Image (cartoon, rainbow, N blue to C red):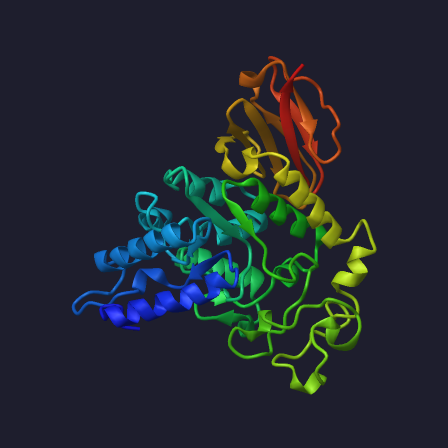
């Protein structure tokens, strides 16, 4: 589209209004750094692009208050921050570089990749927010990593070259984790406890599989598995007429993995994810609070404190496949009692000494820090 032509811009605004009128909450704008082209440039991050986005935001705020614009800009956080503007461009933006580093941290059993990228992430306007994700409808992009890191990710998560596409890995979360419930839960725990708004790709809440034998990016776009019945409850059409075939293997097939069956069990991944979201929503700290990393000597443990006003939450994650002990310097919170957020159980009061915790493989804790 030639956005230099005012008629093109107006027509695109008409398209947006059509969807806004029927009730959509917002838009994900794809590849926004390349909205405008100029000879002699890469067309990336041009001032004209920002001018167009500011006008879109002005119209959205004026005519449809409460609706949201989300930027898809696969760039470093310092570059993406420009798309928040002065709170007059995007409301939200994806944090692309964090995503592969969560997978790297778990595979390496080392907190360094996560800590480094979040410490490099600039502050953003108060009314804006990062969007965090583990997987989406495209390949797991590895553009924002070094060549060595990309090769490592390929070796660990895409040994079959058919799993690779462009500069990424075309697999879903559960198969990448070898269907290991502990690792799946840990990654989702990280997703929901870091600064930003978590986005969950459809099907990952039940542990859906993929089909790497489908072309292009279609392997992670198979029909949602609602039930174990006809077409997994996705469609009443003849199976041959579905755009993508159903997942039907014994491990990830719709007869084994579906919403209907998981709703029947309090111990299913879906039930666990529902509880996680409920706990996360119980406190604004996890969505809007600051983050301060603790740096214990055990590099396999990732610990941080989220704080908003007087409320504090301590997050401790074991990134390792084996049990770990960690001593945390919590002396600035002396006198506080950690309350485990999923069960409401009280842990020993924080004192002058380093606070000792033991964690099972891939285990994590969320604690409210309260004074009594």
In this view of the protein, can residue 362 be seen by the observer?
no
Identify the residue shown where x is 30% and y is 65%.
35
Image position, residue 293 (x, y; %): 50, 32
Q: Is residue 203 left or right of residue 11?
A: right
Identify the residue shown where x is 27% and y is 61%.
44
Identify the residue shown where x is 35% and y is 61%.
32
State whether residue 258 is above or below residue 315. below
Q: Is residue 30 left or right of residue 82?
A: right
Splitting the image into 4 quarters, where does residue 29 fall?
bottom left
Image position, residue 184 (x, y; %): 66, 52
Specify the quadrant that holds the N terminus: bottom left
State whether residue 266 is above or below residue 211. above
Residue furthest out toward the left? 40
Please name whichever residue, 262 or 91, is drawn nearer the observer in this view of the structure. 91
In this view of the protein, can residue 259 be seen by the observer?
yes
Identify the residue shown where x is 30% and y is 64%.
34
Please name whichever residue, 8 or 312, is drawn nearer the observer in this view of the structure. 8
Splitting the image into 4 quarters, where does residue 235 fall?
bottom right
Image position, residue 367 (x, y; %): 65, 30
Please name whichever residue, 318 or 280, is drawn nearer the observer in this view of the structure. 280
Q: Is residue 254 left or right of residue 163?
A: right
> Number of labelled discs?
0
Image position, residue 278 (x, y; %): 67, 42
Q: Is residue 134 left or right of residue 224?
A: left
């Amino acid at each position: 589209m030639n956005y230099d032509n005012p008629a093109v811009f107006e027509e695109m605004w008409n398209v947006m209004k059509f969807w806004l009128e029927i009730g959509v909450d917002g838009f994900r704008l794809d590849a926004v750094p390349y909205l405008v082209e100029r000879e002699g440039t890469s067309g990336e991050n041009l001032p004209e692009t920002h001018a167009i986005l500011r006008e879109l935001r002005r119209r959205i705020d004026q005519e449809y208050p409460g609706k949201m614009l989300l930027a898809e800009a696969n760039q470093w956080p310092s570059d993406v921050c420009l798309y928040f503007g002065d709170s007059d461009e995007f409301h939200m933006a994806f944090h692309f570089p964090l995503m592969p580093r969560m997978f790297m941290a778990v595979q390496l059993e080392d907190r360094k990749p996560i800590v480094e990228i979040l410490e490099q992430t600039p502050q953003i306007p108060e009314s804006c927010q990062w969007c965090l994700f583990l997987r989406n409808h495209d390949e797991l992009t590895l553009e924002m990593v070094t060549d060595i890191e990309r090769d490592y990710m390929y070796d660990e998560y895409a040994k079959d070259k058919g799993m690779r596409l462009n500069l990424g890995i075309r697999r879903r979360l559960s198969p990448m984790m070898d269907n290991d419930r502990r690792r799946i839960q840990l990654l989702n725990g990280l997703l929901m406890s870091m600064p930003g708004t978590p986005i969950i790709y459809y099907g990952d809440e039940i542990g859906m599989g993929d089909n790497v034998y489908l072309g292009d990016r279609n392997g992670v776009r198979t029909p949602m598995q609602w039930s174990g019945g006809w077409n997994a409850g996705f469609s009443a059409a003849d199976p041959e007429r579905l755009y993508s075939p159903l997942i039907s293997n014994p491990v990830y097939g719709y007869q084994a993995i579906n919403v209907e069956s998981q709703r029947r069990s309090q111990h299913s991944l879906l039930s666990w994810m529902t509880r996680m979201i409920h706990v996360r929503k119980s406190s604004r700290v996890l969505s809007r609070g600051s983050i301060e990393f603790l740096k214990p000597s055990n590099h396999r443990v990732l610990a941080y404190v989220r704080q908003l006003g007087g409320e504090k939450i301590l997050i401790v994650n074991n990134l390792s496949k084996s049990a770990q002990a960690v001593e945390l310097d919590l002396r600035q919170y002396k006198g506080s009692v950690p309350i485990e957020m999923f069960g409401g159980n009280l842990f020993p009061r924080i004192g002058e000494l380093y606070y000792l915790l033991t964690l099972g493989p891939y285990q994590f804790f969320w604690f409210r820090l309260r004074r009594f």
